[in-house]
Each structure stands twice: as structure tokens, then as C-alpha cells.
């Protein structure tokens, strides 16, 4: 016969065993959940390591792209300077004439010749490569002329005569009388 523990009945032991079995079952479920959590953590850790590796690669790629961009910026600035130099060189024979009122059907070559004569430089049409009015800017009342001369010495000659004319007058500029025009002040920029 089975021995009984004083103060404990068989049914009480059975209940305790049932409770212990339920707790063991719960621990078993918890153990399974913990195993799943550990697998999830391993997976997340692997993903995190992959992510870190990808970020490291992106940081390196970004660094390289920045260096390339800086080099491209330097090259672009250099090219801009070259273009500016070439444009400046292409304008070496240009003069801008300011202050000549617009007329209908004006002959820009004739006007340029009159301005040259006003500063004491004889000029013929064959010495002018091209002359035209420039686009009017917002704050201008009349657009300027741009004249390209065949020879640089023609431009320099007109500039030097215009400068000496300015020094002789109290007010800068050249007095020039155009057809149908009053007394205008004309300015020349090289």
C-alpha cells in the first residue's frame, strides 16, 4: 500500500502534479518561443551585419563620388575660364559705342564711321568686319553698338583718340552730330 504523507491527500498531490505538469508544458512552450526568438535575433543580426556592410560600401561609394564631383567641378571651372579667355580673345577687336539714339533703317557702319571721324580716326567700311546694335537691357533707353574691326590696331587707334578727346574736354564722351539728332555724348568701351 502506498504511504501517505501526513496532511496531504492523494488528490492534493494529484492537483500539485497537474499544476507542475502545466508549468512544465508552459516552460516547454516558453523554451520553444525562446528558441524562435533566438533564431529571429540571429537573423536580425545577420541582416544588421549585411546592412552595415552595405552602408560601409555606400559610404565609400559616396566618398568616391564626392571626389569625382570635386574633380569635375575643378575641371568645369577650368573650362569656364578657358571659355571666358577664348570669348575675351574673340572680342579683342570689338568696341562698344554707347549713347547713339536709334533711328529707323539706320546704317550701323555709317554711324561707326561718323563716330571714328568724330575722334579723328579716318575709317572705311572695309575696316569694319561687322557692326550692329546689341540687345537692349532693361535699364537702357537705347541699345549699344558692337563693332568688330578687321584689325586690332583700328580698335586701339579709336580707343586712344577717344581717351585723349575725353582728357581735353571737361565732360567725358565725344560730341557727335548725327542725322536728325541733337548734340549727343557718345562713349566708347573696349
Image: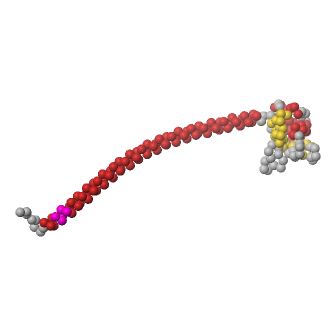
- The residue at 15%/64% (across/down) is 13
For the C terminus, the quadrant is: top right
- The residue at 31%/54% (across/down) is 33
Q: How is the image coloured?
A: secondary structure
Farthest residue in the bottom direction? 7
**Location of residue 71 by image quarter:** top right
Magenta span: predominant SS is helix
**Residue 180 locus on image (x, y percent):** 94, 46
- The residue at 72%/34% (across/down) is 86
**Residue 135 locus on image (x, y percent):** 79, 45
In magenta segment, residue 21: no
34 left or right, relative to 63: left
**Location of residue 166 by image quarter:** top right
**Location of residue 112 by image quarter:** top right
For the N terminus, the quadrant is: bottom left
**Residue 61 locus on image (x, y percent):** 51, 40
State how many labels appear: 0
Between residues 123 and 159, which one lies in front from this camera angle?
Answer: 123
Residue 160 visible within the image = no
- The residue at 13%/66% (across/down) is 10
In magenta segment, residue 17: yes
**Residue 21 locus on image (x, y percent):** 21, 60
Residue 60 visible within the image = yes
The segment highlighted magenta reads: 14-18
97 left or right, relative to 14: right
Whether residue 123 is situated above or below residue 22 in the rendered picture: above
Amino acid at each position: 500500500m502506498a504511504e501517505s504523507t501526513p496532511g496531504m491527500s492523494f488528490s492534493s498531490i494529484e492537483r500539485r502534479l497537474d499544476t507542475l505538469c502545466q508549468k512544465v508544458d508552459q516552460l516547454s512552450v516558453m523554451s520553444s518561443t525562446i528558441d524562435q526568438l533566438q533564431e529571429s535575433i540571429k537573423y536580425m543580426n545577420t541582416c544588421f551585419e549585411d546592412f552595415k556592410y552595405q552602408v560601409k560600401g555606400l559610404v565609400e561609394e559616396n566618398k568616391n563620388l564626392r571626389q569625382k564631383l570635386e574633380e569635375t567641378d575643378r575641371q568645369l571651372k577650368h573650362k569656364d575660364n578657358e571659355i571666358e579667355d577664348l570669348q575675351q580673345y574673340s572680342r579683342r577687336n570689338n568696341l562698344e559705342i554707347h549713347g547713339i539714339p536709334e533711328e529707323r533703317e539706320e546704317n550701323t557702319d555709317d554711324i561707326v564711321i561718323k563716330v571714328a571721324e568724330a575722334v579723328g580716326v579716318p575709317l572705311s567700311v572695309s575696316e569694319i568686319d561687322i557692326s550692329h546694335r546689341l540687345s537692349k537691357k532693361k535699364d537702357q533707353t537705347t541699345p549699344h553698338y558692337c563693332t568688330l574691326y578687321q584689325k586690332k590696331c583700328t580698335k586701339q587707334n579709336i580707343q586712344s583718340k577717344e581717351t585723349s578727346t575725353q582728357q581735353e574736354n571737361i565732360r567725358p564722351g565725344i560730341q557727335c552730330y548725327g542725322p536728325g539728332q541733337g548734340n549727343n555724348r557718345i562713349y566708347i568701351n573696349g
